[in-house]
Amino acid sequence: MTTPLIHSLEARYYTDPAIFEAERKGLLARTWQFAGHASQLENPGDYFAFDMAGESLFCIKGRDGEIRTFYNVCQHRAHQLVTGAGSTRVVVCPYHAWTYELTGQLRAGPNIKAVEGFDKSNVCLTSVRTEVFLGFVFVNLDPDAAPMDDWFPNVRAELSEWVPNWDKLKPIEWVEIPESCNWKVSVENYSECYHCSINHPTFATGVIKPETYDIQPQGYCLRHTTECQSLENMTYEIDRSNAHAEEYSSWFLWPMFSFQVYPGNVLNTYHWRAVDADHVIVWRGWYTEEGWDSETIRRLAVQDRATTVEEDIHLVESVQRGLKSRGYVPGPLVVDPRCGVNSEHSVMTLQKWMREGVAPL
Ligand code: FES
Ligand SMILES: [Fe+2]
């Protein structure tokens, strides 16, 4: 018996603004999304605002040390509360100066005492589920979302072994890469290495052994593993004293974040923010312990931007143009039952999640 062919997702998934809108209300409103790094909120009252799935949100650190996230909207008459990043004792709305505690509770407002029956303890900013995962702050608009450890089994334990100094790391660089394509084109491209040998000579011949590359689901994580071929060819000196120092691996957390660990336990990340059906912004994040050899990491960031990242931009933007062609008929995915580098089984898994992501709530 032959298994039926699995075809790539229909083009409208990547081009139709109505599908993007359905994703905004669907998967983007109920998955874990990266907000920022905990080191951005060192002291009580430190905050930063960000946009996600068409919502403005902000994270703020409480006096109890907890990082909370709120919709960036005043509960009086809906003015936005904060912009950018900063530090504050209380959150003051710029419209009529209603003042909120760092816990989101209304504290005071001009003349509110004049209103009979006004109970300020009933007014609180609307909070958003927040988790700090190895120093990275993630939020989920779904109040009933399962915790990240359920979505991404074992990832926390694995990463803490691969990046033993994770709690000392701080971002030194987030390289911003706007791409004229749908976010799913970029994420699919990230999640298969069928295109690597032709398009990423530095990556495929320098570090990894392509014949050992594989990508397997681990809950809603896609775990990339490979053997490395020639650590001598690396452009930086590798400290081999930690476990996994001679390996490369990555953990893609559906739908828009990935932890990567390069040889030498060098953590770097990808995160995506969908702008509209035709645009996504990708950030490459680089981290160091305070004051630790940031020159090497900066050089790596530059080299990565000039090679793999640059090579991928051309691929994904060409695909986006192709998806708008009347001549495109979605082709069969190359799903090799033995998996491996030249198989698109990971794209098959992603596309299953993508289909589910636009299903009605
Ligand atoms: S809208 Fe915020 S105080 Fe009025
Ligand atoms: Fe690529």
Image (spheres, rainbow, N blue to C red):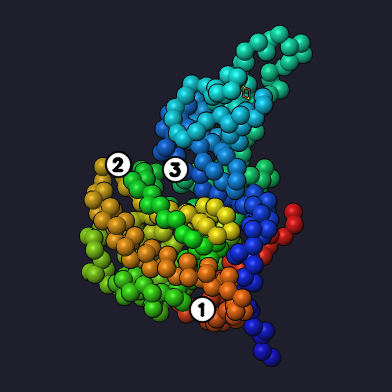
Residue at the far bottom in the pictured view: 1
Nearest the viewer among 25 and 236 is 25
Q: Earlier in the sequence, mark 1 or mark 2?
A: 2
Q: Position of residue 54 (x, y in %)?
A: 60, 46
Residue 53, above or below 250: above
Q: Is 249 situated above or below 48?
A: below
Residue 37 is tagged as 3
The residue carrying mark 1 is 343
* Relative image position of residue 48 (x, y in whole percent): 48, 35
Which quarter of the figure has residue 314?
bottom left
For image coordinates 72% across by 60% down, the residue present is: 359
Within 10 Å of disc 1 (Cα), the crowding (few <14, some 14-19, many 20+) is: many
Density class for disc 2 (Cα within 10 Å; few <14, some 14-19, many ≥20) is few
Q: Position of 208 compared to 192: left or right?
A: left
**Quarter of the image where one finds residue 153:** bottom right
Label 3: which secondary element: strand
In three-dimensional space, the C-alpha distance between marks 1 and 2, rounded to whole angstroms, equals 40 Å
* Helix, strand or loop under label 2: loop
- What type is the residue that disc 2 sits on? Glu
Q: Alpha carbon of mark 3 to alpha carbon of mark 1: how far?
A: 34 Å
Question: Is disc 1 placed on a helix, strand or loop?
Answer: loop
Q: Whole-percent x and y of residue 38?
A: 45, 39
Nearer the observer, disc 3 or disc 2? 3
Residue 198, visible in the rendered structure: yes
Query: Where residue 290 is drawn, which disc sits there?
Result: 2
* Furthest residue toward top: 114
x, y (%) of residue 237?
Answer: 22, 60
Image quadrant in which the C terminus is located = bottom right
